[in-house]
Amino acid sequence: MTPDPTTLHPLPAHERVVFLKPLVGSPKIVVGEYTYYDDPEGATGFEHHNVLYAYGPERLIIGKYCAIATGTRFLMAGADHPTMGVSTFPFTMFGGEWAERTLDIVTGMPSRGDTVVGNDVWFGHRSTVMPGVRIGDGAIIAAGAVVTADVPPYTIVGGNPARPIRRRFDDAGIDRLLRAAWWDWPAELVTEHARTIMAGTPADIARIAADHGPETV
């Protein structure tokens, strides 16, 4: 049986695992189906404990079928401090006359925009994603990595700041996977071919997509 993506706890015996789509309520966080977060100390606190400084208009957008390990944090643009002058102290946040005199500085600060995570991305234990980063489909973020720059599809990154370790497939394989976009297939088709999705090759996935034509999109 295919898991129900609207179920908060897809593993009833393990409340440490939650599907995020039915959990999040903030309009600034958008999550695709089957993306899950695992945390033995309270996975349901994801919005407040793992998405930090979401004070501005920027959104966190996460695709489908992502695996997010304990302690992964997404730092949003509200964490930025002004750096154009002598001090980085955030006078504005304390209100009163400080805010009156400095609000235009804060509102005029440049933003890198939304933080966007593709589909089928695996985040290792205590990885950190900085504001405005874009992470491509199929990427792997190593445990403890601090992602400060965009990550191409199907690339493994690690370290602080995170650097590419290797690509998971060659150019042709990555192109096949991006065009097949298995994460957009109907859930029944994903279930039927789950073994191939886990252990097959890009060519295998491309063949399934070709065999099913418009049904896969």
Image (spheres, helix red, strand yellow):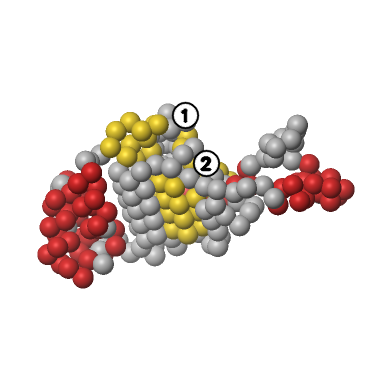
The quadrant of the rendering that contains the C terminus is bottom left
Which residue position is annotated with label 1? Answer: 160
Q: Which residue: 77% across, 50% down?
A: 103
The quadrant of the rendering that contains the N terminus is bottom left
Q: Which residue: 49% across, 50% down?
A: 115
Residue 110 in sight in this render? yes
Q: Which of marks 2 and 1 is nearer the N terminus?
A: 2
Instruction: Examine the rendered structure and indicate whether residue 80 appears above or below residue 65.
Output: above
User: Image quarter for residue 8?
Assistant: bottom left
Q: In terms of depth relative to the viewer, which is nearer, 65 or 167? A: 167
Q: In terms of depth relative to the viewer, which is nearer, 73 or 96? A: 96
Instruction: Examine the rendered structure and indicate whether residue 13 appears above or below residue 4.
Output: above
x%, y% of residue 100? 84, 51
Q: In terms of depth relative to the viewer, which is nearer, 141 or 171? A: 171
Q: How far apart are marks 2 and 1 (CA)?
A: 11 Å
x%, y% of residue 5? 36, 63
Residue type pointed to by label 1: Asn
Q: Which residue: 64% across, 42% down?
A: 80
